[in-house]
Image: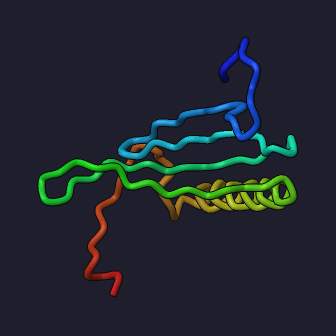
Amino acid sequence: MREGRKFEKNDEVYSKVIRAGKRTYFFDVKSTKGNDLYLTVTESKKSTYNGVERFEKHKIFLYKEDFDKFQEGMQDALAKIEELRSTGEYQNDDNHYSSVNFDELG
């Protein structure tokens, strides 16, 4: 967060960066001209194409009218993940990456 600074409209109010393996996630709280807050979530992934490194970015915008529903959906999905992990059928080790055979996916 940029403290000690007066924020202009359409400016970032808060930013959180999460580095997770080959991906980086940015959670940016911004304000509109009308003083409403919204959230952008950006996934950035480094990739190489024809020997040139680049960053692929995907972004979602979350507006105030959707905050509660989004949070509820996220909490529900994370609770389901914990429930499924506890069955022992799924990996419970966050540092374990399984290999994927794309031919099997059809």
Instruction: Give residue 47's position: percent from left, percent from top.
Output: 27, 53
Rendered residue at 44%/48% (across/down): 44
In the image, 49: left or right of 66?
left
Q: Please determine whether, in this image, residue 49 is positioned above or below residue 39.
A: below
Q: In this view, which residue lies farthest toward the left?
A: 51
Residue at image point 32% right, 48% down: 46
Q: Nearer the viewer, residue 83 or 73?
A: 73
On the image, the x and y values in percent for residue 96 come to: 38, 48
Q: Could you tell me which residue is drawn at 56 percent across and 56 percent down?
A: 59
Question: Residue 31 at what x, y percent from top left?
Answer: 77, 40
Give percent across and percent down for residue 58.
Answer: 49, 58
Quadrant location of residue 15?
top right
Residue 84's quadrant in the figure? bottom right
Question: In the image, what residue occupies the spot 62% across and 41% down?
Answer: 27
In which quadrant of the rendered image does the N terminus lie?
top right
Viewer-closest of 70 and 8: 8
Relative depth, front residue between 10 and 89: 10
